Amino acid sequence: MDLYQVKRSNEDYQLIRNRHYVSNHGCIGRQLHYNIIEDSKIIGIISGASAIWSSKFRDEFFKINTENRKERINKIIDNVVFRLELNEKNLGSRILSMWRRMVKEDWEKKYNDNVIGFETFIFGNNRYGSLYKADNWEFVGMTRGNTKHHAHGIYNGTERVKTEAKMIFCKLIKNKYRKYL
């Protein structure tokens, strides 16, 4: 099994992305996308992108505050999409572990920021974050169920929009940055 970095516009990536339970609205900010290949066949996709700007429980987990937010936020990768189209025992946690190592290295090369950890947000019926728990991510809390919406771009005002509350999972990179936090 291998992960191959692709552009978001990659046709194979988009075909699978459009079948994910979270609607495809594109991706903003820093991002790295991968096709998951087994025996020359694409069996899924996984992506990392810029961490969200603010989340109470994630901020507490990574000790983010107003003084260090700009510096620290770029060192966290948000697992924004992960879709497998092959059901095999432990496959998801094996891929997630492989992805964490690969995306960390690729992120540091491309963006010149030392990665300290990961975040992801889970919602929907019968979704409990089991895959992330199996990979030793920590459940840190729930979102409030609303977000800022920038209807005409970030500089033209925002409004609060109700959303489904999401479970927040985070993972700190082993030992290397514990003293950093």
Image (cartoon, helix red, strand yellow):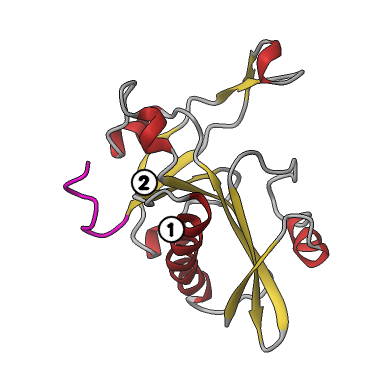
Q: Residue 142 in the image: x percent, y percent? A: 43, 34
Tell which residue pokes out farthest to the bottom in this image. Answer: 39
Tally of numbered discs: 2
Q: Residue 74 in the image: x percent, y percent? A: 44, 40
Q: Is residue 10 left or right of residue 175?
A: right
Is 180 colored magenta in this rendering? yes
Q: Nearer the viewer, residue 52 or 70?
A: 70
Cα distance, mark 1 to mark 2? 9 Å
Q: Nearer the viewer, residue 14 or 32?
A: 32
Q: Is residue 31 visible?
A: yes
Amino acid type at mark 1:
Tyr
Residue 139's tag is 2
Q: Residue at x 49, y 30 (%)?
A: 53
Q: Which residues are magenta?
A: 173-181
Mark 1 Cα-neighbour bin, 10 Å: few <14, some 14–19, many ≥20: many
Q: Main secondary structure of the magenta part?
A: loop
Name the N-terminal-most of marks 1 and 2.
1
Q: Vertically, is 39 above or below 161?
A: below
For the residues labelled 1 and 2, say whether their Cβ atoms are less than 8 Å apart: yes
Q: Vertically, is 154 above or below 45?
A: above
Q: Is residue 41 left or right of residue 67?
A: right
Where residue 97 sits, quadrant-wise, is: bottom left
Mark 2 Cα-neighbour bin, 10 Å: few <14, some 14–19, many ≥20: many
Q: Is residue 129 left or right of residue 180?
A: right
Residue 132's tag is 1
Secondary structure beneath label 1 = helix
